[in-house]
Amino acid sequence: MDELAREIEAGRIETVVTAFPDLYGRLVGKRITGAFFLDEVAQHGMHCCDYLLACDMEMDPTPGYAYTNWAKGYGDLHAVPDPETLRVAAWLERTAIVLCDAVADDATGELVAVAPRSILKRQLARAAERGFAAKTGSELELYLFRDGYDEARAKRYHQLTPYGGYIEDYHLLSGTFAEPVLGAIRRGVDASAIPVEFSKGEWGPGQHEINLRYAPALEMADRHVLYKQAAKEIAAQHGCSVTFMAKWHEAMAGSSLHVHVSLWTPGDCSAFAEPAEPLPGTALEASPSFRWFLGGLLAHARELAWCFAPTPNSYKRYKAGTFAPTRIAWSLDNRTCGFRVVGRGPSLRVECRIPGADANPYLAYAALLAAGLDGIERRTEPGPPFQGDAYQAHDLPSIPTSLPEAIAELAASAFARSAFGDAVVDHLLHFARTELAAYETAVTDFERVRYFERI
């Protein structure tokens, strides 16, 4: 805060974007003048309408939530800045950005239970009670288009031109063509205390991946949503657009969010590596905590699938032979399975390949931690690793194939209610059902093309 005050006084920072993630993982909030932020908001927070945690993509206040509704008058929630998240937004002119916690009770500091950041914090607290800290890494894919957002919207997102003409997985030449935009994204977020590892072409024309350095789970989720915001804004600055839809086109590869997760003990020691013992069915050595954590992930993947795939579009990504998983299994370095074990010793971790790029990272991370911690508590064995092509293994449990199926799994999950609480699960279910209802009542271009003339 002292450094921010100096930057504001010198005129190098004029605006502090003060934001929090909503249920979609979007950032909502206000642009606050630097002086007012220092005088008031830094210490006291800001107020926003609480409908921001009870609305849909169109910002319509959605009836049926217990948390807030018309009968309660849609009052304010208190957004309190977390100073650990304060950073320069290097991609914006003279701007800093800070993320907030949604606070329900100003006197006690009690968090709004249904806020995504609060949901993840609760699971991190449960881990800490058991002597663990969690680290995560997001591998997040996107499509880059030569059309700007206004142009894409005017076209109703049809006939867009990807920033690439062929599958460019690892291709350096096509990456060079996109470098004016992707390089600006890498530099912009890296200069904003969001360390970048690399970018690379992916398995679709115009599809790319920019990997961020792994971090403690809350910090990583914050980096994730800030990176998505920056990527969209930087693309727009270049007259382009990006999408994080899980499946933007039926003929193109889907965009994934691969989450790497590990547990650590005091002294920054890997709880997955020590005490080491042979992992049954492999030549790998791992701790019992690792084995049981993995067992919990497998046991609860179906009932928590909505946390990884929150929209109807999410489920169109799960297609055999596309590097998106369709089966719940674990393996050693096998990209056909929902869970891939990679690394050894201190780098040992689980990669969950189920989430799409549209997932809210706070909810995805919270689901993984809740499932893994339950596995440790119950000493759930994962069984031997799967070997072969999981797409063809029809005896393995499947990832839900539709949003209605995932909603039904979550609604029937006693485990989810024990891990997150009834109020949170009911809130998330209502959010999911609202999204499904909007989809099911829409008349699509598919229907017009198929039925307009010929039925």
Image (cartoon, rainbow, N blue to C red):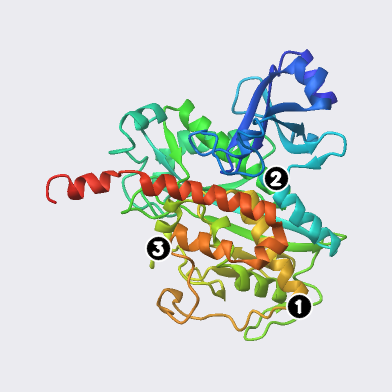
Residue at image location 74% in from the left, 38% down from the top: 101
Q: How far apart are marks 3 and 2 (CA)?
A: 32 Å
Query: In the figure, residue 367 lies in which quadrant?
Result: bottom right
What's under tag 3, amino acid-wise? Thr
Residue designated by label 1:
288
Q: How many marks?
A: 3
Q: Is mark 1 on a helix, strand or loop?
A: helix
Whole-percent x, y for residue 404 in the image: 46, 59
Q: Distance between the residues labelled 3 and 1?
A: 33 Å
Q: What element carries label 2?
A: helix
Mark 2, Cα crowd under 10 Å, few <14 / some 14-19 / many 20+, is many
Q: Distance between the residues labelled 1 and 2?
A: 29 Å
Whole-percent x, y for residue 285 in the image: 71, 79
Q: Is mark 3 on a helix, strand or loop?
A: loop
Label number found at residue 322: 3
Q: In this view, does 13 lie to the left or right of 426?
A: right
Screen quadrant of the N terminus: top right
Whole-percent x, y for residue 428 in the image: 60, 51
Label number found at residue 264: none
Residue designated by label 2:
117
Can residue 379 be seen from the camera position used here?
yes
Residue lying farthest to the front in this orientation? 71
Q: Which of marks 1 and 2 is in front?
A: 2
